[in-house]
Image: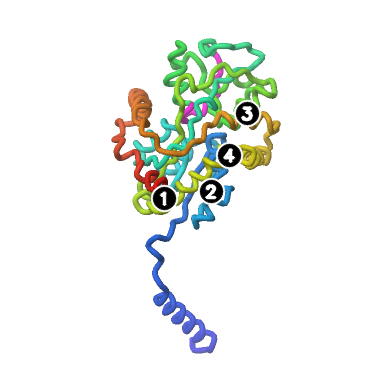
Amino acid sequence: MHNGRGELTRRQWLLASTLALALPARPAGALEMIRQGFQTNIWGMPTYYLLKSGLLEKRGIKFEEFAVPSGNLTMQQMVARQVDLGTYAGQSFIIGHDKGGLVAVAQIETVGKTAQVVTRKDLDIGKVSELKGRKVANQTGSSVGNIFVDVIAPAAGLKKGDFQEVRMDVNNMVSAMAAKTVDAMVNVEPYNAIAVAEGIGTSIMDFSQVDKMPVFMAATPDFADKSPDTIVAYLKCWQEVARDFKDDPGKVTDVIYAFFTSKGYSMSRETFATALAKVEVNPGFPADLTPGLQKDAEVLLREKKISAIPDWKKALRPDLWARAASG
C-alpha cells in the first residue's frame, strides 16, 4: 500500500521500534510480579490480610490473587507452575517438594488449634473412636485430612474402612452436617466455630494435641532462583503484617471478617474473633523446623504419599528470611 495511511502506520512502527531500542533496560533490582495463592479458610487469612493491607504496593510489589478452598490445591497449582507463592501446612509442603521441588521461604503461623474434629451435636459423640461406622467429611489430600487419616484415626483404634470418608471441600462441610448427610467433619476455622455457635456440632478435639501444624509460605524453585530480591522485599512486608496482628488485632479482624461475611457466612464478629485467635501468626524461620518436618515426612513416606524424605537443605530457604530480617 502506498496511501498516506499505510505509510504513516509503517513510520509509526519504525519510530516505536527505534524508541524501544533506545529505552533503558529494566533495572536489575526491579521486582517481579507475584502470583499469590492462598486458601479461603482461616489459614489463608493472614495472606489475605497482607494482600489487602497495601503493604506490598508500598514496596513496589505487584501481585495477582489465586484463591482456593484449601492449601493443598494451592500446592498443586504451584507444582503445575500456575502460582509462584502460597501457604499450606507441613504435610502439603512436603508433598509439594516431592512432586515439584517447592521450597519454604518462611513459617507464617501455627494452626494446630484451628483444626478440629467436630461431630453432629444430636449424635452425642465424644471421642474419635466412636466414629466407627460413621460418615466423616474430610478434604482428602489436605494436611488436616492426612493427619486425621494417618495419625489421629489409627491412634483411636480406627483402621481404614472403619469409617466412611466423604470427600468434601471444607467450606461445604457445615451445611452437610446441618443436612445430616455426614456425622462428623475434619475441618478448620472458622467453619468449626460456626458449627458450634449454630448448635450443629460439638468439637471433640483439636490437632494441637498431635501437631502444632506450622503453615509455610512456599515458593516454586523457579521463582526463588529467578527473583530472590522480590521474595526478600515480600518477606519484609510479612514483618509488618506480624506487627498488625500483635498490636492492632481489631483492625485485622475487621478486614478478615468482612471477607467471610461477603461470602455469605452468617456469624457474629465475636464468633469470628474467637476463631481467628486460634491462628498464631508469627512469621519467621525457626531453627528447629527440621525435626517436625522429618516426622511428618516419615509418615507420608510410610503411606506412600511421597517418593523419598526431602533433603532439607534444598527444601528450606532460611537465607531469604535472614536477608529480609537483616535490614
Rounded to the nearest angstrom, the CA distance separating label 4 from label 3 is: 17 Å
Region of the chain picked out in magenta, as a range: 133-144
Residue drawn at x 59%, y 19% is 203
Asked whether, in this view, residue 187 is left or right of residue 154, the answer is: right
Kind of residue indicated by mark 2: Glu
Q: In front of the other: label 4 or label 3?
A: 4
Rounded to the nearest angstrom, the CA distance separating label 3 from label 2 is: 26 Å
Q: Which residue is mark 3?
A: 274
Q: Which residue is mark 4?
A: 247
- Tell me: residue 37, above or below residue 166: below
Answer whether residue 183 is visible to the viewer in this image. Answer: no
Q: Residue 61 versus residue 3: which sits nearer the camera?
A: 61
Rounded to the nearest angstrom, the CA distance separating label 1 from label 3 is: 35 Å
Give coordinates of residue 307: x percent, y percent.
31, 31
Residue drawn at x 50%, y 55% is 59
Q: Which residue is mark 1?
A: 327
Q: In front of the other: label 2 or label 1?
A: 1
Q: Which residue is mark 2?
A: 65
Answer whether residue 134 is visible to the viewer in this image. Answer: yes
Task: Give the mark nearest the N terminus, 1 or 3.
Answer: 3
Kind of residue indicated by mark 1: Gly
Task: Count neighbours of disc 2 (C-alpha within 10 A) and say few if under 14, some if 14 to 19, many if 20 or more.
Answer: few
Kind of residue indicated by mark 4: Asp
- The answer to the question of whether label 3 and label 2 lie on touching residues, with beta carbons closer than 8 A, is no
Residue drawn at x 41%, y 44% is 219
Please tell me whether residue 296 belongs to the stretch shown in magenta.
Answer: no
Q: In front of the other: label 4 or label 2?
A: 4
